[in-house]
Image (cartoon, rainbow, N blue to C red):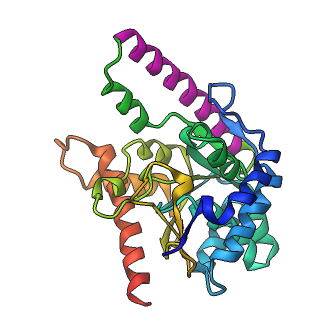
């Protein structure tokens, strides 16, 4: 049994909070947040202590090809990555920096993650860990669906829907600005961390289809190894997640052209397909799962 984040890094968290300045509440004026490099250094120390030395990037040449296509050739780049823990975003930046080459360092510096506003609003501690990485903050569909199920007035529901629209419209504009600056957008297509025994948490969100229309090239990244487990005794408290040191490998699929990939999926669908957008996302998730299983089988 490992230690919870609070147990292992409680004293560190107190230091991080001194440097924390990210927004505690998100509105349409606060959707883009630059990395707080003061809090990031604590997260990188955590990964130094948690990831084994043989952790690394699989198919490194695919990472480099993607970087060259996007940065050197002026294309827009999208990373779609499996999602198991709140260390997944730090992991790709950390492991790119461990490559020790200028292109990989620059790649890491350009990553902007799309993140749900819960990471800002859940607690000061979660926010301090999160803000070490550049993000575009959105109002997730799952959160809005949860509001629909609450026993609140129609006026309150409409107000929340309006808030979601404003935040997500501002987020789309922020992502467009990121693309123009040559930054690379990273999205977790499942929209949430995968929970064993709950296959619905590994299903891709149909909204990802919109990203396939908006970007030139994408890199699909699978994750093998899990050093941060959701605590079954308090699954909603992210600071109660349990650290288990070990090996983590992030593996890149060959670079794909977004529009070509999308069109090839759509062309194979019957004319009466009820939800073609979901089918394109399902195809992404199938590639990620297949790659994950192939890497797992080689262990």
Q: Residue at x 57, y 45 (%)?
A: 115
- Say whether residue 177 is magenta: yes
Where is 159 relative to 9, above or below?
Answer: above
Where is 56 relative to 104, above or below?
Answer: below
What is the magenta range? 154-179
Q: Describe residue 270's horizontal placement relative to residue 133 as left or right.
A: left
Where is 118 relative to 231, above or below?
Answer: above
Q: Describe residue 109's horizontal placement relative to residue 149 as left or right.
A: right
Residue at the bottom extreme?
Answer: 298
- Say whether residue 158 is magenta: yes
Q: Residue at x 40, y 52 (%)?
A: 262
If the image is split into quadrants, where does the C terminus sit? bottom left
Where is 282 relative to 123, above or below?
Answer: below
Quarter occupied by residue 60: bottom right
**Nearest the camera: 155 or 215?**
155
Q: Describe residue 14's horizontal placement relative to residue 194 as left or right.
A: right
Image coordinates for residue 156, horizontal then vertical, percent: 42, 14
Figure disc tally: 0
Is residue 44 in view? yes
**Nearest the camera: 196 or 207?**
196
Is residue 72 in view? no
Quarter occupied by residue 169: top right
Image coordinates for residue 200, horizontal then vertical, percent: 29, 53
Q: Residue at x 58, y 46 (%)?
A: 114
Magenta portion: prevailing SS class: helix
Image coordinates for residue 243, horizontal then vertical, percent: 55, 69
**Nearest the camera: 296 or 195?**
195
Q: Residue at x 61, y 81 (%)?
A: 55
């Amino acid at each position: 049994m490992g230690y919870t984040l609070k147990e292992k890094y409680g004293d560190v968290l107190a230091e991080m909070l001194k440097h924390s300045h990210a927004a505690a509440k998100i509105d349409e004026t606060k959707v883009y947040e630059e990395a707080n490099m003061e809090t990031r250094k604590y997260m990188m120390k955590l990964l130094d202590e948690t990831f084994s030395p043989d952790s690394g990037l699989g198919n490194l040449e695919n990472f480099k090809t993607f970087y060259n296509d996007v940065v050197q050739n002026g294309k827009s780049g999208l990373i779609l990555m499996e999602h198991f823990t709140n260390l997944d975003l730090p992991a790709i930046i950390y492991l790119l920096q461990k490559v020790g080459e200028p292109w990989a360092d620059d790649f890491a510096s350009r990553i902007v993650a799309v993140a749900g506003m819960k990471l800002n609003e859940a607690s000061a501690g979660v926010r301090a860990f999160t803000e070490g990485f550049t993000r575009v903050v959105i109002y997730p569909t799952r959160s809005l669906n949860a509001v629909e199920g609450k026993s609140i007035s129609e006026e309150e529901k409409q107000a929340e829907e309006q808030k979601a629209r404003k935040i997500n419209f501002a987020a789309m504009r922020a992502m467009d600005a990121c693309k123009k600056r040559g930054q690379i957008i990273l999205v977790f297509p499942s929209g949430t961390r995968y929970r064993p025994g709950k296959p619905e948490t590994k299903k891709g969100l149909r909204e990802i289809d919109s990203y396939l229309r908006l970007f030139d090239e994408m890199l699909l990244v699978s994750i093998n190894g899990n050093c941060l487990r959701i605590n079954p005794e308090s699954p909603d408290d992210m600071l109660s997640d349990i650290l288990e040191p070990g090996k983590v490998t992030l593996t890149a699929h060959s670079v794909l052209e977004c529009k070509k990939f999308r069109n090839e999926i759509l062309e194979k669908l019957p004319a009466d397909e009820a939800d073609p957008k979901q089918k394109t996302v399902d195809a992404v998730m199938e590639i990620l799962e297949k790659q994950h299983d192939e890497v797992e089988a080689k262990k």
